[in-house]
Image (spheres, helix red, strand yellow):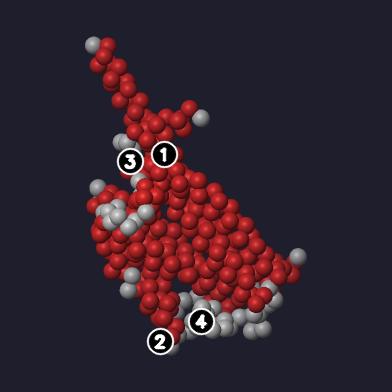
């Protein structure tokens, strides 16, 4: 196991390379998830405002 | 639309139908990406022997080369989608082109960083201004330019059209990146994998590399479809299907 982690003395190059690969791809995958959640929240708020306005009008 | 295009393909261009289609495909693409990626990592990091010259440092190849292939492949897809979007004004094609750009930029960034981490122990330098490295850096700037141009317009579709032009012009860089190791003297090694003729690599190293290539392709589908779904919801937020979906997701 230690020999595996040492990567023949190149551990300080090999592991950061793999870390960059995973960190960048995870960030890429998550960014639209958050954007989608935010957009839907804003859309619901807008729909709620429109509903409230319609009710105001019908009440006089 | 020309009538030789099958009806289902035509329907797939409709945002609500593509939204559902992408939502159904995406989990499978991600699962395949993770499984293939895990197998490739095991094969590349554990099973494959050390290189006779580079020792274990060469193992960076298993992410560097698939990422580099993806950086060019995604640019090709972006170029084709941009062309379709410009000519036929199909909203979905514009969205596919614009949402490919960040994924391509991510893979290009990975290629440059992992290449740098590989170059330091093997060449003795993090960076050199040679043809392959410079053209790959230009590729990153092209991706960033497309992303920037897209977001600099108030009207999303106007931005998409301007950015699609840039994407099409930038496509000349793709063959430059690919053939740079043959056209110029460079520190970067030549192609290892050949489609025509035998590859210059041991079979125990080749299969993890090809498996990782498959994994990154599946990842691209998963990531692209997630991004396209998000974009479609945003662009169509005035339409009934999005309103229904928004209220449905709130009650869950």
Of the numbered discs 2 and 4, the one sitting upstream in the chain is 2
Name, please, the residue furthest toward the bottom: B185
Image point (40%, 76%), residue name = B177
**Residue of label 4:** B196
Q: In screen coordinates, is A22 left or right of B10?
A: right
Query: What count of labels does the image hold?
Result: 4
| CA gap, disc 1 and disc 3 | 15 Å
Q: Which residue is mark 3?
A: B236
Q: Which mark is residue B42?
A: none
Residue drawn at the location 33% of the way across and 38% of the way down: B237
**In the rendered image, is residue B179 in sight?**
yes
Looking at the rendered image, the quarter that the C terminus of chain A falls into is top left
Specify the quadrant that holds the N terminus of chain A: bottom right
Cα gap from disc 4 to disc 1, whole angstroms: 48 Å
Chain under disc 4: B
State the CA–CA distance, disc 3 to disc 4.
46 Å
Q: Nearer the viewer, mark 4 or mark 1?
A: 4
Give SS at disc 2: loop
Residue receiving disc 1 = A38
Q: Nearer the viewer, mark 3 or mark 4?
A: 4
Image quadrant of residue B101? bottom left
Residue at point 41% right, 81% down? B180
Cα–Cα span, label 3 and label 2: 48 Å
Q: Is residue B45 left or right of residue A26?
A: right
Query: Callout 4: helix, strand or loop?
Result: loop
């Amino acid at each position: 196991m230690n020999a595996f982690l040492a990567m023949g003395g190149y551990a300080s190059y090999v592991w950061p390379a793999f870390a960059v690969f995973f960190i960048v791809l995870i960030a890429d995958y998550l960014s639209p998830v958050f954007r989608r959640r935010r957009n839907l929240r804003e859309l619901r708020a807008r729909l709620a405002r429109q509903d409230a306005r319609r009710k105001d009008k019908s009440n006089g | 639309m020309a009538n030789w295009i099958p009806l289902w393909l035509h329907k797939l261009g409709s945002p609500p139908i593509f939204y559902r289609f992408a939502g159904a495909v995406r989990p499978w693409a991600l699962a395949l990406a993770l499984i293939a990626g895990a197998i490739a990592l095991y094969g590349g990091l554990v099973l494959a022997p050390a290189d006779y010259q580079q020792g274990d440092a060469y193992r960076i190849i298993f992410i560097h080369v698939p990422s580099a292939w993806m950086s060019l492949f995604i640019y090709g897809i972006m170029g084709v989608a941009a062309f379709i979007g410009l000519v036929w004004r199909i909203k979905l094609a514009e969205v596919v082109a614009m949402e490919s750009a960040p994924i391509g930029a991510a893979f290009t960034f990975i290629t440059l960083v992992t290449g740098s981490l590989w170059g330091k122990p093997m060449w003795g330098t993090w960076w050199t201004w040679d043809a392959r490295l410079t053209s790959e850096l230009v590729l990153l700037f092209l991706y960033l330019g497309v992303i920037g141009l897209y977001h600099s317009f108030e009207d999303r579709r106007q931005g998409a059209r301007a950015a699609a032009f840039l994407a099409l012009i930038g496509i000349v860089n793709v063959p430059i990146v690919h053939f740079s190791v043959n056209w110029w003297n460079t520190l970067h090694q030549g192609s290892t994998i050949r489609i025509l003729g035998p590859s210059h690599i041991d079979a125990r190293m080749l299969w993890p590399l090809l498996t990782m290539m498959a994994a990154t392709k599946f990842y691209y589908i998963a990531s692209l479809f997630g991004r396209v779904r998000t974009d479609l919801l945003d662009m169509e937020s005035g339409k009934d299907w999005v309103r229904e979906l928004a209220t449905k997701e709130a009650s869950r």
